[in-house]
């Protein structure tokens, strides 16, 4: 005997609610190259509206290609996010302005200050001239304390690799990770960002030389076949999430690591989506500790 129509409908609705509840009871981290985010984009309401929707889904967003010498664009973004999502408060931590020539950009962590805090950070190249010479733009690392996740202490290493130097820089990131593991006495580390780790920037043979790729402690969660580009003409996994350490790997929600297709999610045309960025964010969910789940 089947369920009466109304009961079945109510049941379906309950399942949907439950699904949303389950999805909400995780901790989301993303990395997003917002192509040339500066004054012009901050002044574009449509673009800002979309960015706010995309970023306010995440507990921590590792934002890249911030091109904003006065710092006004990122402040406007934070103001809009705080206005849009009153259930959280968003703050940010920015790298220095990176780049050797006159072209500069910044990496910025945008995060929910009511959920997670920054306990330390490290701008590579600041106190170490070797790193400065090694990277076109030095990586930026922050250590987070997150009381609700199964792993409460972890490091995010954010990097925007130079396309032409991607092989060398990816390999060097291995050494940076080892230094951070020593410095902060933790194995829980995640490398994320637009690593240009695909397409013609990395030949099939070059992969074998990249320690970050081949060392067993590193787990590449965004696979080579993924497409992190918005354009229909390209299909490349430039943007990656790589987890170091078994404990942090165990905290990842299975199959949660993927690009976020905002063209689809926001119902945009390709042209509209490209106004926001040429990259999709890549994201991953961490499991919450049982206690935190009960409290929700
Ligand atoms: C993203 O979604 C759009 C619209 O549904 C689709 O045309 C496109 O192929 C998707 N891109 C990727 C990389 O999945």
Image (cartoon, grey):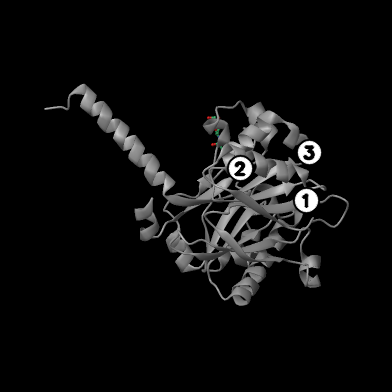
Q: Considering only order in the chain, which callout, 1 or 2, is on the residue closer to the N terminus?
A: 2
- Whether 121 is drawn above or below 69: the answer is below
**Mark pair 1, 3: CA separation:** 13 Å
Evaluate if marks 1 and 3 touch, with contact meaning CB atoms under 8 Å apart.
Answer: no
Q: Quadrant of residue 134?
A: bottom right
Note whether ligand 1 is within 8 Å of mark 2. no
Q: Nearer the viewer, mark 2 or mark 3?
A: 2
Q: Quadrant of residue 192?
A: bottom right
- Whether 280 is drawn above or below 271: the answer is below
Q: Considering only order in the chain, which callout, 3 or 2, is on the residue closer to the N terminus?
A: 3
* Residue 280 in sight here: no
**Mark pair 2, 1: CA separation:** 24 Å
Q: Which residue position is annotated with label 2?
A: 82
Q: Under tag 1, what secondary structure?
A: loop
* Residue 186 in sight here: yes
Crowding at dot 2, Cα within 10 Å, few <14 / some 14-19 / many 20+, comes out as: some
Q: Nearer the viewer, residue 148 or 278?
A: 148
Q: Nearer the viewer, mark 2 or mark 1?
A: 2
Residue 100 screen position, x and y as percent: 85, 57
Q: Nearer the viewer, residue 178 or 164?
A: 178
Crowding at dot 3, Cα within 10 Å, few <14 / some 14-19 / many 20+, comes out as: some
Q: Which residue position is annotated with label 1?
A: 105
Q: Under tag 2, what secondary structure?
A: helix
Q: Which residue position is annotated with label 3?
A: 39
Which residue shows up at 31% across the image and 37% down it?
15
**Mark pair 2, 3: CA separation:** 19 Å
| Residue farthest to the left, as pictured | 1
Q: Nearer the viewer, residue 23 or 195?
A: 23
| Residue farthest to the top, as pictured | 5
Which residue shows up at 63% across the image and 48% down it?
238
């Amino acid at each position: 005997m089947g369920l009466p129509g109304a009961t079945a409908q109510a049941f379906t609705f309950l399942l949907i609610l439950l699904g949303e509840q389950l999805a909400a009871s995780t901790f989301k981290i993303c990395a997003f190259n917002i192509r040339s985010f500066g004054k012009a984009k901050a002044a574009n309401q449509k673009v800002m509206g979309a960015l706010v929707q995309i970023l306010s889904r995440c507990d921590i967003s590792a934002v890249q290609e911030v091109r904003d010498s006065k710092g006004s664009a990122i402040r406007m973004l934070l103001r809009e996010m705080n206005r849009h999502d009153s259930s959280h408060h968003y703050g940010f931590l920015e790298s220095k302005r990176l780049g050797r020539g006159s072209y500069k950009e910044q990496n910025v962590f945008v995060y929910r200050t009511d959920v997670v805090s920054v306990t330390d950070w490290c701008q590579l190249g600041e106190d170490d001239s070797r790193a400065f010479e090694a990277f076109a733009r030095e990586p930026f690392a922050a250590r987070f304390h997150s009381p609700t996740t199964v792993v409460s202490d972890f490091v995010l290493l954010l990097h925007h690799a130079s396309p032409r130097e991607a092989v060398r820089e990816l390999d060097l990131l291995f050494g940076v990770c080892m230094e951070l593991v020593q410095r902060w006495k933790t194995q829980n580390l995640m490398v994320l960002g637009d690593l240009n780790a695909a397409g013609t920037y990395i030949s099939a043979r070059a992969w074998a030389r990249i320690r970050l790729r081949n060392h067993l402690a590193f787990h590449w969660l965004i696979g080579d076949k993924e497409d992190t580009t918005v354009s229909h003409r390209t299909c490349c996994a430039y943007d990656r999430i790589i987890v170091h350490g078994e404990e942090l790997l165990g905290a990842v929600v299975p199959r949660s690591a993927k690009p976020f297709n905002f063209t689809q999610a926001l119902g945009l045309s390709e042209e509209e989506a490209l106004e926001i960025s040429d990259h999709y964010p890549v994201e991953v969910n961490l499991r919450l500790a049982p206690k935190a789940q009960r409290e929700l």
